[in-house]
Image (spheres, coloured by chain):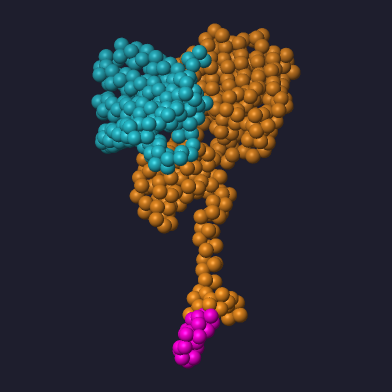
């Protein structure tokens, strides 16, 4: 994509760079949140909460740049789609960071994490959610509509996981009333992971939109 | 050296004309001669300078244009970053990070916060980064600034080293348990037989010996599977390079897995001319394991469909579908774990080692493919393997 106005090209490249940077931070946040939960690492949880501020700062930087591009350069067609998609993706990625922060916070309140039985399914779910975020950001970087569709299809797996974890935890609560508060926190973790999956799907839809100009058709899913 | 210096003929002619003019105007001949000599010498000196500059010029061109060609075929992923943009990425870097990175912001290429921090700092340094291209891979990235705004980034894959220590501990824990179970019954039955010393019921003896034989065979199968699993794991990070035509391979290994008595249950639907880069033995094992599973766990007389076709995004798709009782959704995510069983008793009775799908998963990973398992309780299970077509074959297709 060569533009006659070099400054415009530079702006778009910078915008994409910022989005990629946000995506990388969100990927690490999801991964760290799961690691902190499984290992019971409170220092790591603190770090996630602190790092989320940087993600917020980046989002406002993206906002400013995108608004400036629209105001000064009046982009058309695929350039406009690119800027609009960037604006939306930045918001969504920032939310993914927030959910990771929420997982880190909830994790601290689960007593005896290492011995907590129902912990087995949640990391597997976290793995898929983190992979979705990773693939969505790779699809964004490569403008890869096919990979974006794959991310969208994967969301079903995360939803299935959530249902299965929900049932497991409810029966666990019935059998072990003493662990209800921990189990409830665990439920929030699973819920947040499910939301992360949904948001990765949103990013993928936006990537599909920026690449092709159309939102993916739902017929296949 | 002096002979090579071209004489500035035009300038000298001007000087001669000038001196002639001065004489005509009535200047002293000595002054005119002095002016002529001064002109001539300074012209000659001035024109003699350029030659040394010429080689320097070609040197300058070498540093930028030829650098791309120079690093292109290096096995190590290398990138040249200029003012925050990827100016050059060699073949290895494009394979790892994707061909789209050239011309993009370096943050699009690296994405990981620690790697970006390194690139932003613009000082020489290294960082160990987890999850750069694929999740869970480990890369050591080093940055070396060249001159203003230009830096070289080198990436070295450290994944293999980190994997080895982890898989060792996993292996010992799981395998010892699985190996002990058949050994315990072999020892138990053998001891009973030894105590009876020949005066027992012959039918009972037959039964005990049968059990010992069956358990020994299971033990052998387990050891075989463990060995191939560890072999695949050892080669996990080397991409296989043989060009393989999938159709004959899938057909022959599916027949092989079924054997003479089950082969008529298989329905083939194979597309021709799909070539991938792969490892012949491992791909055969992949198909054998999938077909064997489908025949074993599908309904006794129901057909098993083995299909091969081209999928989206330049991939070959191998699907093995059975019509059996299916797998409950809560088991699906765990199926590829070693020694995971949905129904321990039944799986052991049918001679399964619990490693079949783990092996399949590792083979698929080594071939940079994807494994998807879909199942509906009461209807059946479909296992789909997608492997990227070899680039040459993919070009032919499109």
Quadrant of the drawing holding the N terminus of chain B = bottom right
Residue B158 against residue B319 in the figure, above or below: below
Where residue B157 appears, x then y in whole percent? 49, 45
Residue at 42% across / 29% down in the picture?
A: A76
- Give the magenta range: B15-40
Residue B95 against residue A135 in the figure, above or below: below
The answer to whether residue A122 of the structure is visible from this angle is no
Residue at 60% across / 28% down in the picture?
A: B315
The answer to whether residue A15 of the structure is visible from this angle is yes
Residue at 47% across / 21% down in the picture?
A: A214
Task: Pick whichever, A211 or A221, lies toward us.
Answer: A211
Majority secondary structure of magenta residues: helix
Q: Quadrant of residue A80?
A: top left
Where residue B312 appears, x then y in whole percent? 58, 24
Task: Pick whichever, B304 or B355, lies toward us.
Answer: B304
Residue B226 is covered by the magenta coloring: no
Residue at 48% across / 15% down in the picture?
A: A218
Quadrant of the drawing holding the C terminus of chain B = top right
Color used for chain B? Answer: orange
Q: Quadrant of residue B135?
A: top left
Image position of B301 (left or right of B14): right
Residue A98 against residue B68 in the figure, above or below: above
Image position of B220 (left or right of A75): right
Task: Pick whichever, B326 or B245, lies toward us.
Answer: B245
Where residue B103 appears, x then y in whole percent? 47, 42
- Tell which residue pokes out farthest to the right in this image: B260
Task: Pick whichever, B5 or B392, lies toward us.
Answer: B5
Color used for chain A? Answer: cyan
């Amino acid at each position: 994509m060569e533009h006659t106005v070099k400054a415009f090209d530079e702006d778009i490249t910078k915008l994409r760079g910022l989005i990629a940077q946000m995506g990388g931070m969100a990927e690490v946040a999801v991964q760290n949140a799961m690691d902190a939960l499984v290992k019971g690492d409170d220092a790591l949880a603190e770090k996630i909460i602190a790092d989320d501020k940087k993600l917020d700062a980046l989002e406002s930087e993206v906002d400013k740049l995108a608004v400036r591009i629209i105001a000064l350069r009046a982009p058309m067609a695929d350039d406009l789609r690119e800027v609009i998609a960037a604006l939306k993706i930045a918001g969504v990625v920032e939310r993914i960071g927030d959910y990771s922060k929420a997982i880190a916070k909830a994790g601290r309140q689960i007593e005896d994490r290492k011995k907590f039985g129902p912990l087995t399914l949640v990391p597997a779910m976290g793995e898929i959610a983190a992979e979705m975020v990773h693939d969505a950001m790779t699809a964004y970087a490569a403008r890869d509509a096919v990979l974006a569709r794959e991310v969208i299809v994967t969301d079903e797996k995360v939803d299935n996981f959530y249902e299965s974890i929900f049932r497991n935890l409810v029966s666990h609560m019935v059998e072990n009333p003493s662990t209800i508060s921990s189990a409830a926190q665990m439920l929030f973790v699973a819920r947040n992971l499910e939301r992360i999956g949904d948001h990765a799907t949103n990013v993928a839809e936006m990537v599909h939109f920026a690449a092709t100009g159309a939102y993916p058709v739902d017929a296949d899913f | 050296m002096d002979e090579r210096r071209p004489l500035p003929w035009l300038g000298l002619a001007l000087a001669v004309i000038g001196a002639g003019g001065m004489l005509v105007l009535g200047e002293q001949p000595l002054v005119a001669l002095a002016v002529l000599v001064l002109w001539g010498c300074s012209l000659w000196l001035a024109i003699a300078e350029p030659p040394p500059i010429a080689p320097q010029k070609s040197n300058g061109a070498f540093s930028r244009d030829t650098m791309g060609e120079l690093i292109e075929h290096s096995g190590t992923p290398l990138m040249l970053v200029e003012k925050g943009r990827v100016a050059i990425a060699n073949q290895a870097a494009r394979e790892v990070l994707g061909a789209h990175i050239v011309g993009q912001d370096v943050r699009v290429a690296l994405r990981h916060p620690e790697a970006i921090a390194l690139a932003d700092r613009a000082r020489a340094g290294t960082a160990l980064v987890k999850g750069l291209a694929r999740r869970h891979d480990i890369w050591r990235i080093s940055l070396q600034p060249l001159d203003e705004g230009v830096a070289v980034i080198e990436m070295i894959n450290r994944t293999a080293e980190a994997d080895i220590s982890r898989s060792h501990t996993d292996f010992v824990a799981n395998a010892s348990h699985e190996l002990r179970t058949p050994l315990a019954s072999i020892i138990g039955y053998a001891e009973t037989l030894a105590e009876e010393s020949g005066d027992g019921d012959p039918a009972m003896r037959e039964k005990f010996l049968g059990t010992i034989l069956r358990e020994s065979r299971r033990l052998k199968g387990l050891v075989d599977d463990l060995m191939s699993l560890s072999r695949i794991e050892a080669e996990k990070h080397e991409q296989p390079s043989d060009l393989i035509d999938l159709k004959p391979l899938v057909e022959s290994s599916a027949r092989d897995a079924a054997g003479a008595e089950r082969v008529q249950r298989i329905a083939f639907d194979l597309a021709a001319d799909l070539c991938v880069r792969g490892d012949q033995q491992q791909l055969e094992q992949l198909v054998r394991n999938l077909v064997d599973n489908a025949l074993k766990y599908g309904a006794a007389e129901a057909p098993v469909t083995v299909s091969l076709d081209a999928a989206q995004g330049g991939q070959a798709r191998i699907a093995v579908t059975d019509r059996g009782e299916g797998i409950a959704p809560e088991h699906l995510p765990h199926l590829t774990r070693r020694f995971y069983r949905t129904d321990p008793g039944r799986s052991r009775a049918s001679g399964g080692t619990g490693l079949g799908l783990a092996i399949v998963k590792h083979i698929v990973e080594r071939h940079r493919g994807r494994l998807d398992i879909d199942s509906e309780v009461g209807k059946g299970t479909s296992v789909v393997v997608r492997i990227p077509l070899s680039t040459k074959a993919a070009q032919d297709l499109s």
